[in-house]
Image (cartoon, coloured by chain):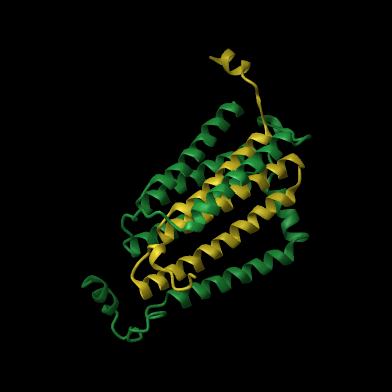
Chain colours: A green, B yellow
Amino acid sequence: MHLILFFLFAGFCLAGAINLLLQSHPISSALSLIVVMTSLAVLYLLLGAEFLAAAQVIVYAGAIMVLFTLVVMLLNAGREERTLGSHAARGVGFPAVVVILGVLATVILKAQGLGVARLADGITSTEELSKVLFTELLLPFEVTSVLVLIAILGAVALARHGHGDPHDNGGADPLGNRERTADR
Amino acid sequence: MNQLFSQLPQEVPLSWYLLLSAALFSLGVVGFLIKRNLITVFMSIELMLNAVNLSFVTFAHQWHAVKGQIFVFFVMMVAAAEAAVGLAIIIAVFRARVTLAVDRIDLMKL
């Protein structure tokens, strides 16, 4: 059963990732990335990480991807144009990808002592996880909350209307930006 | 049907999970290189983060360690913050340049 589930959702993962590369419309790429993230949540569950499976669906497939699709729709991102890309990408990037994948695959296949995963292995309960998180790792947890707060403030400050646009009249005319974009 | 299921091996080597993680990471790098839309390039980065998370969870299962899973939790929080700030930057770039094509956002390119 574990084998079937693994192949099914690993296949979904790879298919979604390849589809992300092949689609030329950003919204299709975003939807295939949601498929990848949801399948990864099932794989986490197979590895016994119940809390992370739930967090993956809520935080990644939910919150982050909603943000992505919202920005794609807000900016009305159309079909992307295919260009050849830079010389650096073709000359160094793709050989580097092949080398990285080759080295990683060789190391993983040669590694000794890697165990197996079974359905009977049992799961790490959220209780165990939170015991460590809220005692030993309390300080990093609190620091993360400060980080998220700063990120919210930074996002609002960056995306505020009129910011980063020298021709804008400082937000006095909320339609100014849209008109300028429309008459191009 | 039940007999067919019981004949199948009931376990999956953890190296397969690691291989899947490596493949997803490489696909993320390829996407980062070939995509020509700023938002899709950013999505490829998220794909790489997810691939690394999968290997963290795999190793947490291998060593029966809770801290590996907690590290994934922290990566998720940082990724959420990064997505919020990154998308705000993309909106600011779009306001200034009125394009999302990475070929035309080349002010800092040599």
> Residue A101's quadrant in the figure?
top right
Rendering quarter of residue B90: bottom left
Is residue B75 positioned above or below A173 on the image? above
* Closer-to-camera residue (A53/A109): A109
* Residue B38 relative to residue B26: left or right: left
Q: Residue at x 25, y 76 (%)?
A: A180
Q: Give the vertical position of A4 relative to A124 (above or below).
A: above
Residue under the image location 73 percent in, 35 percent down? A110
Q: Nearer the viewer, residue A121 or B37?
A: B37
Viewer-proximal residue among A53 and A105: A105
Residue at x 75% of width, y 35% of height: A114
Give percent across and percent down for residue A9: 53, 35
> For this view, does A42 lie left or right of residue B38?
right
On screen, residue B42 versus residue A80, left or right, reads: right
Q: Residue furthest left?
A: A183
At horizontal 37% and vertical 84% (from top left) the residue drawn is: A166
- Where residue B36 appears, as percent x and y from the top left, is 41, 57
- How many numbered markers are drawn? 0
Q: Is residue A170 left or right of residue A39?
A: left
Residue A26 in the image, given as x and y percentages of width and height: 38, 54
Image coordinates for residue A33, horizontal then vertical, percent: 46, 48
Q: Quadrant of residue B59?
A: top right
